[in-house]
Image (tube, grey):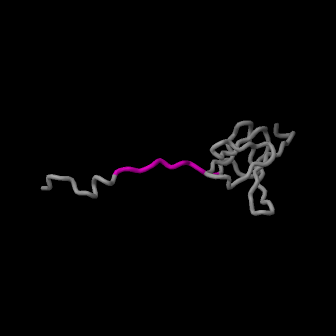
Amino acid sequence: MAHKKGSGSTKNGRDSHSQRLGIKKYGGELASVGNIIVRQRGSRFKAGLNVKLAKDYTIFALSNGIVMFKKSKKNHTTVSIIKNEKNL
C-alpha cells in the first residue's frame, strides 16, 4: 500500500464544460426577434441584414424572417434575415 498518492492521480480529474458553439438556426429556417443564429469565437460568420453581432461574436436576429447564409467574394460567409410577409 502506498502512503502517498501517485503523481498521475493528483494531476487528473479536471475537465472544462463544452462551449456549445456553432450554428443554431440553419438557412431556410424561421427566426424571430432575439433568436441566436450562430455562436462563434471570432467573426468567422459576418453579420448581414437584420442581424447583429454581439460582443462575444454571437449573431442574433433583429427581425422576424428566414435565415440566409451567403458566401461573399473574400470567402466570408454573411448571415442575413429576409423578411417574409407571409410568415410574420
Quarter of the image for the C terminus: give it: top right
User: How many tags in the picture?
Assistant: 0
Instruction: Using residue 43 as the reference point, say whether residue 14 is left or right of it.
Output: left
Q: Residue furthest left?
A: 1
Identify which residue, 29 or 58, lies in the foreground. 58
Identify which residue, 53 or 29, lies in the foreground. 53
Q: Where is residue 64 in the image (x, y as percent from the top left)?
A: 78, 38
Q: Where is residue 79 in the image (x, y as percent from the top left)?
A: 75, 51
Q: Position of residue 65 (x, y in %)?
A: 79, 42
Identify which residue, 8 or 61, lies in the foreground. 8
Instruction: Using residue 42 as the reference point, say whether residue 84 is left or right of it.
Output: right
**Quarter holding residue 62:** top right
What residue do we see at 47% from left, 47% from top?
Answer: 17
What residue do we see at 68% from left, 52% from top?
Answer: 43
Q: Position of residue 77 (x, y in %)?
A: 74, 57
**Quarter holding residue 52:** top right
Magenta stretch prevailing secondary structure: loop
What's the magenta region? Answer: 13-22
Whether residue 17 is in magenta: the answer is yes
What residue do we see at 14% from left, 52% from top?
Answer: 3
Quarter of the image for the N terminus: give it: bottom left
What residue do we see at 79% from left, 48% from top?
Answer: 48
Instruction: Using residue 85 as the reference point, say whether residue 68 is left or right of it.
Output: left
Whether residue 69 is in magenta: the answer is no
